[in-house]
């Protein structure tokens, strides 16, 4: 997968552990080499990471990688995060509402 031009990975449920390991590998590889001279000389041009979960709290497991992606121009230009929630939190939960709205608006851009 890391030898391709474009990588699409999906993580959900119990599959989130290998997904996080892949995310860490991609972030390390592109962060260190800028995507050049990666595995077998191939360069990842674009990485799409789809994370599907019931609770927004679970996204905290990827916070360290998210921070690195948005703070590094090479990573930010090549790694696209697609975060999806499958549950509908209560309307009285202000934090959940703000997150849902931010995700909805970003989805319009994606």
Image (cartoon, rainbow, N blue to C red):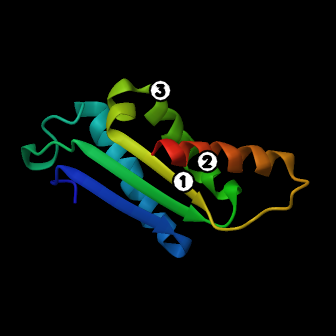
Helix, strand or loop status at disc 2:
helix
In percent of width and height, residue 105 lies at 60, 43
Q: Nearer the viewer, residue 65 or 85?
A: 85
Residue at (53% x, 34% y) in the render: 67
**Residue hosting label 2:** 103
Give the structural element (helix, strand or loop) at label 3: helix
Residue 84 vs 32, above or below: the answer is below
Mark 1 element type: strand
Number of marks present in the image shown: 3
Of labels 2 and 3, earlier in sequence is 3
Q: Is residue 89 left or right of residue 7?
A: right
Report crowding for label 2: few under 14, some 14 to 19, many 20 or more residues within 10 A (C-alpha).
some
In this image, 71 relative to 59: left or right?
A: left
Verify CB contact (< 8 Å) between mark 2 and mark 3.
Answer: no
**Residue, disc 3:** 71
Residue indicated by mark 1: 83
Quarter of the figure that contains the N terminus: bottom left
- Mark 1, residues whose alpha carbon is within 10 Å: few (<14), some, or many (≥20)? some
Nearer to us of marks 1 and 3 is: 1
Left or right placement of residue 78 versus residue 21 in this view: left
Picture residue at 65% right of the left edge, 58% below the top: 58
**For residue 89, what is the image quadrant?**
bottom right
Compared with 22, 81 (above or below) is: above
Where is residue 3 drawn, in percent x and y?
15, 54
Mark whose residue sits in front, 2 or 1? 2
Mark 2 or 3: in front is 2
The front one of 80 and 65 is 80
| Most foreground residue, 5 or 58 | 5
Q: Distance between the residues labelled 1 and 3?
A: 18 Å
Vertically, is 56 above or below 98? below
């Amino acid at each position: 997968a890391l030898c391709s031009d474009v990588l699409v990975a999906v993580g959900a449920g119990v599959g989130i552990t290998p997904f996080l390991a892949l995310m860490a590998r991609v972030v390390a590889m592109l962060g260190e080499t800028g995507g050049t001279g990666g595995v077998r000389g191939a360069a990842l041009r674009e990485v799409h990471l789809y994370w599907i979960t019931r609770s927004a709290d679970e996204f905290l497991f990827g916070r360290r990688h998210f921070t690195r992606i948005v703070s590094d121009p090479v990573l930010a230009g090549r790694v696209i995060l697609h975060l999806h929630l499958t549950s509908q939190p209560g309307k009285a939960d202000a934090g959940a509402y703000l997150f849902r709205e931010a995700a909805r608006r970003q989805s319009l851009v994606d």
